């Protein structure tokens, strides 16, 4: 045991840097996997908790005020019903902030779809103007129990009695109204668009399509105005958290594989360099199992130290991380499965590294006690014809011999290049993810965000008046009237968003990534989510129902649709009016001039029109992915550490294989500087080959992964943006020069080694 510990200690002293990198890389991998687990739990658990505790309906059906919604309770598969509740659409204002809301009339909190009070108290018939706001809406309006809300355009005020959590889709400015519970009398006294909403809790939660189809058959297509399911609400509640978790998990697993391969390569190279020492250990009585355990326990200890460090840092400091990551860790630490994940993830990482280490260490156990004679041929092998031709052209011998040494042993050289290319490939993928996020901010018109503001007007302003107010803005480059309605899909199993934007004279600047822009009658562009939902492609015709009117459109292009899960089809406003001449403009999309601040323009419009116009900034999906930048930087740092381990292994292997060639190189007159240049060139050539392979494979892989994520989310393929060629060239040059610089010092020491020392190592 004492001899084994002395051997391990001596080996650690000679490879301190490699040991440190293994510990840090393992810590980074475990942290990324723990954060991925955290984000998955954070994305699903809060909504699931609210949905379960509130007995949330699996489908919400909105109907007109005259529909007999009570009949929905008799549908097959319906176990309980929430409502029907009377509703009214209106606008509420507080502290200069406005929000479109849906007032829902109720008195008692029902069993199904029961709002969970977060603060304050429930509705009281003694306070007829009292309301309870959904918690997210209350945060947007900056109100709490006891505050007063104004109804713009009227002298009416509402008193906030409390806030509550709900599992329904949350408020989205300009897209979805917020939820406000009020007494039925307060809803009837509101001058807004009226209707009803009914929630159905089903025996089979996945049977929402059938339930909606039965509801349409029972009430008629004209009666149903909108449908939303629990799957949509869960997906929206998860938002970018699940995507962040997927990114962290994917990179964490890939980095774990790269680290395991790096450790495997390091041990294999070390075994080749210590064949004589291992033979001596066996000659003095070490068994093959003991030799294997020396390498195995040493590297498992490194991995265990990194895993424990990562778990401790995540537990102690994870909740203090800025933004969404800190919130996610704080919630995760209070969940029942927190302890199991905190112990299980590091243990799994250590076991995986141990398994990989064991495979490499097994070779050390097979070394015979009496080492065989080494081949008399030079380790580098005979010079190839290309190398001899290069020397004949009087190219520097150090460069030619260095290139020859890097690729003389093809299986071993290809393995070294492949192991080093893997972390470089992952770094290219991480940089591509950051570049794609930057594209949403720098070139929003290319990713379905041609306009920056959505403006809605109250009933006191006509369309010409609104156009006059908007066209007069100095920072407004284009105004596109529009309307957005809910339409029943073929089969009447759900609703999609049907948008009419722009006119034939002033077309909306769609940017289709497939097909073309709609220009003729009945032509439209659709999102990937709608194409998947209806199982159609560009070039097909689709039929949908808006109220009692059928709408038939020809899909001529696929547009990137970040909103509504891509379940959106867009045509010009004139196209929709051809089928329904009474269709009135409901909103205006504003394209701003370069450099204009959307938030400032929105505030100025609301102020100058004295509240008659309500402007909202079009949400950018990249805003929710801002933590991904910091995550990408951390992952790149971890991958860089793994790359350093691979470089150290490659440099060590090159030096050991060149030990026997050192006397011959000196004998032919090469100086220590030239011998150093051979090793540096060999390392640089290996790094260059790895950079070429990593970049060549990383760029298309990043495009495929990002576009696959876009397709699965409904946004659609075509959003991927890789780093510029100049940036990739600089990245490759930095990697090659860094590798060469890292090899200079150990190569110089080896070149100045005494002749007697070299003979003792070769013997």
Image (cartoon, rainbow, N blue to C red):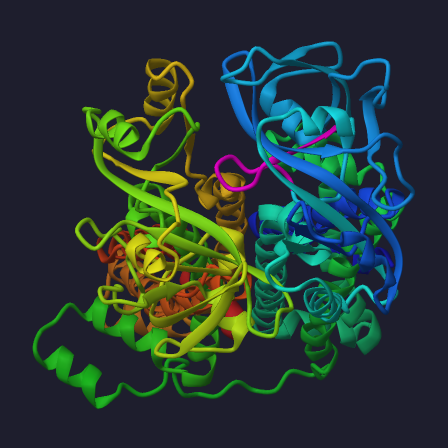
Q: How many marks?
A: 0
Q: Residue 589 colored magenta?
A: no
Which contiguous range is marked in magenta?
170-182
Q: Residue 341 or 588: which is nearer the viewer? A: 588
Q: Is residue 257 left or right of residue 560?
A: right
Residue 439 at x, y = what percent?
34, 48
Residue found 53% across the figure and 53% down from its top: 564
Q: Judge whether 246 appears above or below 537 on screen.
A: above
Observer able to see residue 33:
no
Tell me which corner region of the image, top left, top right, bottom left or bottom right, holds residue 313: top right
> Is residue 180 within the magenta segment?
yes
Q: Horizontal placement of 94 versus 465: left or right? A: right
Q: Quadrant of the N terminus?
A: bottom right
Q: At 75% from the left edge and 78% from the top edge, which residue is drawn?
A: 365
Q: Is residue 40 above or below residue 90?
A: below
Q: Nearer the viewer, residue 534 or 341?
A: 534
Q: Is residue 232 left or right of residue 350?
A: left
| Res 476 quadrant in image | top left
Residue lying farthest to the front in this orientation = 66
Q: Position of residue 603 (x, y in %)?
A: 38, 19
- Residue at x-position 44% and y-position 74%: 542
Q: Is residue 133 visible?
A: yes
> What percent of the width, then of the height, locates residue 244?
59, 49
Q: Main secondary structure of the magenta part?
A: loop
Q: Residue at x 31, y 26 (%)?
A: 597
């Amino acid at each position: 045991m004492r001899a084994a510990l002395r051997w391990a200690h001596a080996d650690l002293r000679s490879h301190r840097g490699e040991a440190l990198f293994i510990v840090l890389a393992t810590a980074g991998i475990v942290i990324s996997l723990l954060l991925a687990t955290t984000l998955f739990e954070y994305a699903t658990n809060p909504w699931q908790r609210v949905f379960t505790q509130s007995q949330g309906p699996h489908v919400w059906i909105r109907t007109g005020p005259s529909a007999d919604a009570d009949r929905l309770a008799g549908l097959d598969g319906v176990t309980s019903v929430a409502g029907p509740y009377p509703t009214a659409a209106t606008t509420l204002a507080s502290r200069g902030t406005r929000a479109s809301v849906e007032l829902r009339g109720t008195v008692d909190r029902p069993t199904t779809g029961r709002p969970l009070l977060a603060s304050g108290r429930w509705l009281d018939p003694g306070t007829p103007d009292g309301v309870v706001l959904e918690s997210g809406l209350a945060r947007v309006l900056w109100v709490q129990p006891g505050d007063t809300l104004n109804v713009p355009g009227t002298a009416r005020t509402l008193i906030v009695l409390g806030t509550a959590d709900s599992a329904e889709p949350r408020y989205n400015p300009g897209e979805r109204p917020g939820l406000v519970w009020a007494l039925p009398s307060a809803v009837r006294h509101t001058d807004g668009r009226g209707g009803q909403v009914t929630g159905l809790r089903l025996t089979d939660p996945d049977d929402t399509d059938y339930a909606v189809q039965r509801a349409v058959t029972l009430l008629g297509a004209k009666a149903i105005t909108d449908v939303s399911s629990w799957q949509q609400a869960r997906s929206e509640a998860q938002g970018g958290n699940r995507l962040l978790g997927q990114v962290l998990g994917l990179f964490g697993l890939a980095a774990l594989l790269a680290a395991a391969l790096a450790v495997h390569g390091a041990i294999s190279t070390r075994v080749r360099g210590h064949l004589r020492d291992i033979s001596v250990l066996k000659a003095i009585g070490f068994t093959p199992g003991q030799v294997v355990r020396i390498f195995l326990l040493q590297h498992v200890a490194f991995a265990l130290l990194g895993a424990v460090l990562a778990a401790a840092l995540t537990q102690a400091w994870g909740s203090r991380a800025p933004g969404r990551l800190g919130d996610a860790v704080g919630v995760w630490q209070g969940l029942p499965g927190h302890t199991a994940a905190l112990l299980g993830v590091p243990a799994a990482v250590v076991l995986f590294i141990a398994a990989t280490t064991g495979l490499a260490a097994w070779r050390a156990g097979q070394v015979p006690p009496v080492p065989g004679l080494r081949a008399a041929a030079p380790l580098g092998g005979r010079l190839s014809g290309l190398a001899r031709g290069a020397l004949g052209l009087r190219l520097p011998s150090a460069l030619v011999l260095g290139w020859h040494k890097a690729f003389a042993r093809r299986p071993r050289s290809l393995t070294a290049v492949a192991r080093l290319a893997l972390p470089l490939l992952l770094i290219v993928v991480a940089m591509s993810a950051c570049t794609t996020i930057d594209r949403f901010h720098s070139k929003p018109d290319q990713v379905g965000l041609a306009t920056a503001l959505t403006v809605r007007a109250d009933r006191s302003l006509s369309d010409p008046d609104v156009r006059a107010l908007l066209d007069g803005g100095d920072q407004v480059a284009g105004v596109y009237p529009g309307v957005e309605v809910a339409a029943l899909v073929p089969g009447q199993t759900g609703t999609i968003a049907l948008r009419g934007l722009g006119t034939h004279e002033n077309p909306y600047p769609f940017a289709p990534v497939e097909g073309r822009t709609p220009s003729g009658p009945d032509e439209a562009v659709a999102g990937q989510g709608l194409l998947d939902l209806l199982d159609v492609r560009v070039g097909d015709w689709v039929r949908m129902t808006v109220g009692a009117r059928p709408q038939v459109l020809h899909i001529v292009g696929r547009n990137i649709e970040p909103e509504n899960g891509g379940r959106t089809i867009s045509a010009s406003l004139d196209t929709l009016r051809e089928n329904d001449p009474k269709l009135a403009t409901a909103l205006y999309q504003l394209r701003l001039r370069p450099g204009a601040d959307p938030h400032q323009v929105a505030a100025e419009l609301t102020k100058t029109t004295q509240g008659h116009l309500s402007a909202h900034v079009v949400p950018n999906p990249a805003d929710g992915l801002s933590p991904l930048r910091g995550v990408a930087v951390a992952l790149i740092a971890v991958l860089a550490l793994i790359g350093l381990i691979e470089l150290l292994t490659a440099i060590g292997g090159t030096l050991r294989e060149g030990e026997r060639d050192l006397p011959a190189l000196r004998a032919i007159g090469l100086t220590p500087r030239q011998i150093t240049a051979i090793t540096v060139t060999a390392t640089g050539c290996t790094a260059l080959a790895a950079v070429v392979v990593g970049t060549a494979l990383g760029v298309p892989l990043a495009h495929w992964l990002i576009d696959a994520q876009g397709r699965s989310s409904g946004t659609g393929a075509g959003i991927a943006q890789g780093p510029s060629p100049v940036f990739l060239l600089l990245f490759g040059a930095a990697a090659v020069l860094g590798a060469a610089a890292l090899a200079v010092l150990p190569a110089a020491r080896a070149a100045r080694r005494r002749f007697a020392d070299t003979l003792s190592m070769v013997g």
